[in-house]
Image (cartoon, helix red, strand yellow):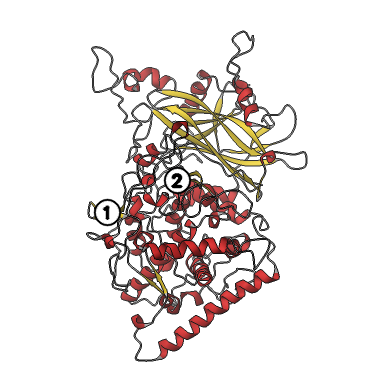
Amino acid sequence: MSRERTAMFAVAFALVALPTISGLITKIPTPKELYECYLYKSLNASISETPAKVIQEFCISKYIVQHMDETIYTHNITKEGVNYLNAMSRELNQEITAMEKLQKKPRHKRQAFGTWRIRKEIRTLTRQEFQALVNCFNRLKNDYSIDSSMSTYDLIGSMHTGRAARSMHNGPGFFPRHMLMMLIMETACHSPMHYWDMTMDSDMIVPTDSIMFSEEFYGNGDGIVRTGPFAHWRTPIGTPIIRNIGSGGESLAGKQGIRAMLSRRRLAEISEPQVGHAAYSVEVHHNGVHNWIDGHMARLNTAWFDPIFYGIHSFFTLIWIAFKGLQRNRGIDPQRDYPLGPNVPSGHEFFQRADFRPFLRQISNLDALADTYDRMVTYMPMPRCPSCDNSPYLVCQRQVCVSRARPRMRQNMFMFGRKKRSANVNPTPSVYGTQKPLSDSDSLADDNVDNKTINILQSSETALSTLDQPYQNTFLIDGKSDLNQWVWLNIKILFERPKGFNFHTNLPGQNNTVDMYDTSNFERIAEKIGIHNQITYKKQCSSSGSGAAKVFVQSDGLNYAGRYKDYAIVDERQPIYSSVSYIAVKKPTTAKTTKVLLTAFDTCGRSCRAACPVPGTNGNSYEPCKGAFEITSEYPLMYSTSYGGAVSAAFSVHLESKGPMYRVNNHPITFVCDHQNKWPWE
């Protein structure tokens, strides 16, 4: 950092009276593997185009999976449970054997192989087909006949926990291992899985309005799932399923991103690890969907709690099958195209077997590339204009099929407790369009896609749509929901007005093209307090009109499994605005301190930078820091054991009190959202 920039930070922070900090909350280095991930994912990326939050979230997720305690969320499966999953595997193998025998008969062409596994986009299912899917999930969820300690649905989902989850992500094993999990669930259902083409929601003006999150399909997306066919489901931990759609700062996968992946020739080109924030990486787009839904879906060990999980991964299996079909057209044998060499992460090598221990270890990553698996499943193509497969839940707009929106009125309650209407859509269509199955000649690819132009920034409209939504945490910590294990920190937010806004609030006799709050009206003063050198984003994040906006603050455990997120409301009109958020972390003990990573970002995924006091300055000078902290249980405590305690530690509104109304010394950590051309980890 330059001397000028360091001095600017010191002056700016001193003028706004940043708090002092105790040695009981100390900054620590960012873990080496996490920091290296930041570096290689941001290589050749532009902060004006790529939201830092997307890179942070990818690397945090990867770090957590690599370092998690394998026993967390991993249940002690009974012998009966193991036998059941092995029985599903044997049934699947028998189907494969029968398929291979048919394949050897010359009169059977590839497309002639019959299969009952006909997967359709969920909005093109008839109501009878949709109900069969719902009945399957609910039947398995309520079935405890195999293992009395968990439902059969949870038994199958446990294949995505512990060591298995580690070997299913962050490498080329992502596709084959999720493909196998989809087949096991489908075998247990004895009815076809569906897929959710979220690109049709991504193309909506406001994706959070999608009918997918209504009673007609997945149920509500704001907080506890209370509507729809999976309403009031309980997770294996005993808590309800939670979603916070649009609150993750990331976007749903879009058609441009899918085309980018399909424009590549080799599996290695779309698999992790990828240098730079490559839009060709399937896991980048996959992770964005999980984080957009948020709640349980945002963590790999708990994502399968929500049945949306299967619609998501069935869709990415469709993309993989389409990719392999294009490889065949290009003269590449997809059955042999498994990445080799030192860059393949441990556990993802071609010879590694699907690690669903203690069961299902028969199939290697290379074996799972066999054409036989493609032939077991028939995918109906993604709906296309002009018919959109005649689905009443889709409409052709701008030459693409997009999801219809549910009514503007939210589905839970009006103010004062009056109930709201469900979506006004014909629920009983009898026959939809008759499309042909996906073939190798079906191409979604665009060979002219530029890796740097793929938009992964959450839309401005989605960001605004979440402004009136609260945020519901899962409160999971080390695999349990225990409020007593959480403590709260007071976090201060300093938010600088971004470039490019105009709120049309003019001073008399002044230039009416610039509003009175714009720092261009007082550039010298703005520069004096450090408001300068801001970056201009390629895609602006729209203002709400009033100036109200959210800044999220998030904690991720470095030595515990837990995440907490909340937001502060800021005023984007003002040159600089101060606000407060209260963030929970694991309660430290005398035996074990708490190590945590804190990050902050706006609703469009633009990250803020952590600020720490310069040692020996008594809080009168601050400098950027990395956001990793260690918290001890020594007195005086720098945290509160309850949310209310955190609020009272920050404020006192007794006018007769002799003490300060705003207790600045009780805000040990600050985030500065100053929109600089600098990654927050630099």
Observer-nearest of 53 and 649: 649
- Kindly state the secondary structure of the residue where label 2 is placed: loop
Observer-nearest of 50 and 377: 377
**Any mark on residue 245, and which?**
2
Q: Position of residue 369 (x, y in %)?
A: 46, 75
Q: In this rendering, which labeled residue sits more in front, label 2 or label 1? A: 1
Vertical order, 55 against 308 (above or below): above
Q: Position of residue 345 (x, y in %)?
A: 55, 63
- Residue type at numbered disc 2: Ile
Q: Where is residue 511 in the image (x, y as percent from the top left)?
A: 23, 18
Instruction: Using the numbered discs, state the Cα–Cα distance from disc 2 to disc 1 in whole angstroms.
Output: 22 Å
Q: Name the residue under label 1.
A: 395
Residue at the bottom extreme of this rendering: 106
**Any mark on residue 241, and which?**
none
Observer-nearest of 173 and 676: 173
Q: How many residues crowd mark 2 within 10 Å: few (<14), some (14–19), many (20+)?
A: many
Q: Which of marks 2 and 1 is nearer the N terminus?
A: 2
Q: In which quarter of the image is residue 73?
A: bottom right
- Kindly state the secondary structure of the residue where label 1 is placed: strand
Q: In which quarter of the image is residue 483?
A: top right
- Residue type at numbered disc 1: Val
Vertical order, 346 against 216 (above or below): below
Give left or right: position of 647 versus 58. Answer: right
